[in-house]
Image: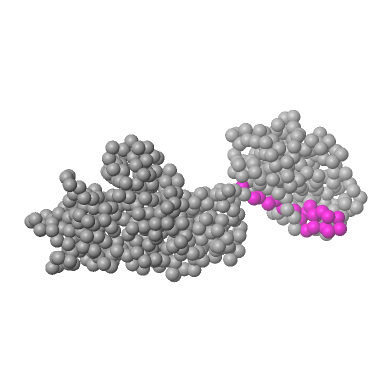
Amino acid sequence: MDDEVKDQITLTSLKQKTEEYWDERWNLDTYIRELFKFEFDYLTSNQAINSNEIKCEVLVLLIGYSWEPLFISICGHLPNILVPVINENYGDIQGSAYRENLMEYLDILKDIELLKDVPRFHPDPVELITSDNPKGVFTFLKNSVLPLMNQYDDVIIDITGAKKTMVSGAYLFAAYTNTPISYVDFNDYNIKYGKPYGYSCFIEHFENPMEKFRLNDWTLIRSYYQNYSFDLAKNIVKNILFHVKNFFNENEIENLENFVNVLNYYKLWDEGKFKEANLLYNNKDLRIPNLSAIDKLGNSWFDEKDFKNSLETVESIANLEKSIYNEDERLLIYTFNEFAKSKKLYNQENYKSALQRAIGLFELLIKSRIIRMWLKNQYVLDSEGISQSRKQFNNVNKWDFEMGRISALKYMIYSLTWERSGDKTLYIKKYQGHRKEKAPKLDKFWRYDNEIREIKTRYNLKTYPHDFLCLFRNKSLHFCLNIPKNIAKLSHELLMQNIRDFILNWARGNWAKDGNWGADKDLNKFIENLINDYNLNVKPLKWGELIRILNLAFLPNRDDR
């Protein structure tokens, strides 16, 4: 076909010529010379394809039954190296025939000057894949293409026309190696012939799906969420919103923005910022159940902007009767909230943090006992040989304030045990404090309990477990001491013993339980049953449940199984 005829070819004539090709069933040699050359000229002249922008060093080409779109990909990408992925069989036709045909067609493309040079094959000679399932394709690409990636950065995988199983394997490899994917798409399709018009085609480039949709990021987000690293998860979600916002509809974007708020809410909860979390929960429709600690403690919890006054509100050391130490609901909700966090830290093998949180909660419950004994006149302060209980002091508020300042566990223990010899006092300035002789003993829940005796034997302790744990806690805080697993486990067991004793002997009203509750030797089950019985919400939602509630329908909502 001479230049004059070529100049007369229009879009209409291209369409007619294409249908003539289909009707007369030209062979591909004739198609390339009589039609494809002009189709491709039309595509490049109309900027549907710009080889200067999409040229690559290595093109991985998945060979299917249709050749025409593959010619567009080859001439558009102009690779120096071609990695054809060819099956052993295409129905009744052997893959070796496809291999020979490919070599022939490349020579024709060079002959009509659509290719300057025939690309070099890799591997050479061309190998046929023995299995076209995803694993087989992935293995072939890993063995043949991965070595090229150490030499060339510019690699593209074209999936046009390949079987779905082959495409799946190619996608896996693209995700594995962070390689972009291309395919030949079209704007005009003939329903009668079941084929697209070549002049309407264009090459679409699709970034590595793992990168484009931030699939790796979602795996990280899930992992961070399940490990309570809410701030890290939140930052990644915000990054996803910034980079791939166009891939989501308005409802999905709204749900993602709400997800950011939910992660921030859980972050504040994990940091103990109940007041801020409560404000966020009340001001935003988070669509998740409120955590009990936020719901019941948020209004009156510590405020960083007014720490001194808010601390007084929580502890009420100037008015101990209204203190958290004397109020079961606030105290126990906080207790179970912190217990759940301590257990999570232990399960994550963060033994140092688990021990510190467990011992801090252990001390809190002991301090509550001391305050309650003081308010019941079962605890006395000595001054100049005179012992006085709370009711015997003229200025009760002053002494309530002094009692509220008690914090050191070591002295708490001394003040609550009754020994005929040895140090049994708690020094508050120049005053000495201790429990009355007939007042309740606190140490019985670890001293006389068979399980605690077993713990002492198991860990070869020569002192009381609480002293031993405090030693480890202080050394880990003020020195570089690492906490071994068995010590963290001991702190957790002692904390559960402490909680059980408090519930059975010190709690009041609806929070109190009788001895039947303490019969269960499985402490974990005992605590779990209490949390369920009190109807407390002490942990963030499971990942799958969170995804369902927030309607993040584009994510799988299965939890780990």
Residue 302 position by quadrant? bottom left
Q: Residue at x 44, y 51 (%)?
A: 520
Q: Residue at x 80, y 46 (%)?
A: 66
In this view of the protein, can residue 154 be seen by the observer? yes
Residue 512 position by quadrant? bottom left
In this view of the protein, can residue 108 be seen by the observer? no
Colour convention of the picture: one colour
Vertical placement of residue 258 versus 355, above or below: below
* 447 left or right, relative to 108: left
* 340 left or right, relative to 422: right
The image shows residue 278 at horizontal and vertical percentages of 40, 66
Q: Residue at x 70, y 31 (%)?
A: 123
* Image: magenta residue range: 188-208
Query: In front: 501, or 78?
Result: 501
Residue 514 position by quadrant? bottom left
Vertical placement of residue 280 versus 159, above or below: below
Whether residue 205 is in magenta: the answer is yes
The image shows residue 48 at horizontal and vertical percentages of 70, 54
Query: In front: 165, or 301?
Result: 301
Single out the residue that lies furthest toward the right: 24
The image shows residue 72 at horizontal and vertical percentages of 75, 47
Q: Residue at x 39, y 66 (%)?
A: 510
The image shows residue 428 at horizontal and vertical percentages of 16, 55
Whether residue 517 is in magenta: the answer is no
* 119 left or right, relative to 98: left
Single out the residue that lies furthest toward the bottom: 283
Single out the residue that lies furthest toward the left: 384
